[in-house]
Image: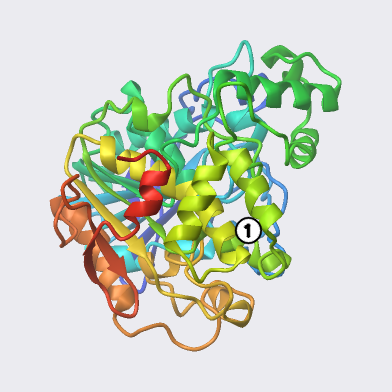
Amino acid sequence: MEVSTTLGAVRGLDEDGIAVFRDIPYAAPPAGAGRFAPPAEHEPWSGVRDATAFGPTAPQAPRVLGEMDMRAYFGEGWHRGEDYLTVNVWTPGPAATGSPVMVFVHGGGFVAGSGRTELYDGSAFARDGVVLVTVNYRLGIAGFLDLPGAPANRGLLDVVAALRWVRDNIARFGGDPGAVTVFGQSAGATVVGGLLATPQATGLFRRAVVQSGNGRGAFSPEQGARVTRAAADLLGVEATAAGFAEVSDDRLVETASRLAGIDLRTATHTDPLAGLSPFSLVLAAQPADALVAGVDLLVGTNAEEGNLYLVPFGRYGNSTEADVDALAARVHPDPVRLVEAYRRNRPAAGDGEIRSAVLGDALFGAGTWALAERHTGRTFAYEFAWRSPALGGELGATHSVELPFVFGRTGLAGVRGPNRLLGTGEPPPGLGALVRGSWVRFARTGDPGWPAYRTGSRTTMWFGADSGPVDDPRGAERRAWGSA
């Protein structure tokens, strides 16, 4: 099965009636000094390029989250090779015309992940009549370290380049370039939020889905410079693009792993990622405060996001009042008022629940509410509340647990088991079809199936054992973050 792209022909596979094309370049290999340059045009190829197998990934270290087995989410680590700025495409068939297109930007803390992990197989979307595209982009130091002499946010610029490739090529795979929905999760969702504030991305997509992202998760230039200085000191090089250009990928990956935990609080800014990642977008204004793309927006979080960063490490059950107060001081300008609001709203909660709730909203909730409040186009909100029974039932409705439902992968072995995302047992029947169906309907029509988010009601779709729309389900905690 062959398709001709603007760079050359590619040969894919028919997999159970779905046409799949893997490892198609959208930009030149980022090698040497090019690792710190804007994405460049890939050289055309002659003949037919094999697109039947996944290719290399961005340089990265294996990512481990305590007791959790997250390989279905992060992948197995670094698959070496320079030509990794690629896309993978699942389509109902290249002969089709006008299918909606969904472009997925993976998460992984800005340092891990790829579009080739088994969780992101696009077959279910293709069976629903959608052309599904997954994207690899630069990570870690190459993708997000703010370097004098290099453009900022190179990983985001890669996604813009991938969207240009989609615009120019997706009709050849049966997709409609005028009906593109870009969606991302976690760090990928924060990148999608950044796209909403990036003029170069205007017109490249019609709709956006932000799953557990952070519209206020960007570092200020001062914070970005603090990370750059720390990385340069570890490497013993000048804190410039020229200084980093001579450093090998292996050393960059090793150094990125040593940067975790930097305190990014400044006189004017709290730490938007609570010390969990030394990388993010670096912007003078937060995406939620600088929106330029008037697209349809679907935005939401999970009900217990913070559990993933506490439970697998044994930090949930032994949380103390001091832990809660220290976290609040790191992420909020008025930590005493913040903690009081959460304890008042959750009078029966222990310190572990309060700590998790504050952490989850610092990382995802506050920025999600800000996007929903400030976006001027049609906006729809959701909260995913089904509780995973993993890790003895403590994992709950944590970060990333919605992804198997979105991708129709709840039966995947890699997400089933006592220490994997979905735990043991069976999730509620029909929940996966409801979630993915809502995403597909949104991509087709701009309406996922429930009332739009408006400041009078703040209607939010609640996905769980009993799904349905509710009004402003966590208003008191939302207001504690300054969302009126």
Residue 458 x/y as whole percent? 22, 52
Nearer to us in this view, 36 or 107: 107
Residues 254 and 161: in front is: 254
Residue 416 in percent (x, y) is at 55, 79
In the rendered image, the vertical position of residue 218 relative to residue 430, given as above or below:
above
Q: Position of residue 431 (x, y in %)?
A: 32, 77
Identified at 53% across, 25% down, the residue is: 282
Q: Is residue 54 left or right of residue 443?
A: right
Q: Is residue 364 shown to the viewer in this render?
A: yes
Give how far across and how far down residue 380 sits, in percent: 22, 51
Residue that label 1 marks: 309
Question: Which residue is located at x 69 percent, y 27 percent?
Answer: 227
Residue 58 in view of the camera: no
Secondary element type, mark 1: helix
Q: How many other residues sit within 10 Å of disc 1, few (<14), some (14-19) or many (≥20)? A: many
Left or right of residue 292: residue 358 = right
Could you tell whether 453 is left or right of 389 in the image?
Answer: left
Q: The C terminus appears in which quarter of the rendering?
A: top left
Give the residue at x 71% y 13%: 242
Q: Amino acid at mark 1?
A: Tyr
Where 30 falls versus 407 (above or below)?
A: above
Q: Quadrant of residue 280?
A: top right
